[in-house]
Image (tube, rainbow, N blue to C red):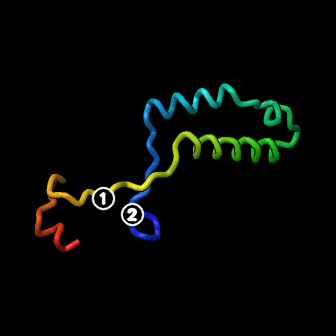
Amino acid sequence: MDEQGESLFRHYSDTNISKLISCLHMNDWSKVLSDKDVNIASEIFTRRMELLANKNFPVKKRRKCLTPNCPGMTVNLISHI
């Protein structure tokens, strides 16, 4: 949860996964594969994967449903929110 108590999530849909796979194929991985220092190669790889994950699976706030159409939400409960 964030500082306002709202729930945060990432949407791992089939579409978003396909977009990530496409980005992975289009990326130039030569710096990662050619670096002799495993620590540097690992850092480059990790940063690149974080960027791609954030691009394709952005953090979103879960919407709060404040209408009586929500299961379990009565008018009485809504009036106390």
The three-letter code of the residue at mark 2 reads Glu
> Residue 59 location, x and y as percent?
50, 51
Residue 13: quarter of image: top left
Residue 50 is tagged as: none
> Residue 32 location, x and y as percent?
79, 36
| Residue 74 left/right relative to 24 | left
Q: So how many labels did they put on this image? A: 2
Disc 2 to disc 1: CB gap under 8 Å? yes
The crowd level at tag 2 (other Cα within 10 Å; few <14, some 14-19, many 20+) is: few
Kindly identify the residue that appears in the image at 19 percent across and 74 percent down. Answer: 80
- Residue pointed to by mark 2: 6
Q: Quadrant of the C terminus?
A: bottom left
- Residue pointed to by mark 1: 64
> Residue 7 location, x and y as percent?
39, 59
Residue 55: quarter of image: top right
Kindly identify the residue that appears in the image at 86 percent across and 43 percent down. Answer: 37
The crowd level at tag 1 (other Cα within 10 Å; few <14, some 14-19, many 20+) is: few
Cα gap from disc 2 to disc 1, whole angstroms? 8 Å
Farthest right residue? 36
Q: Quadrant of the N terminus?
A: bottom left
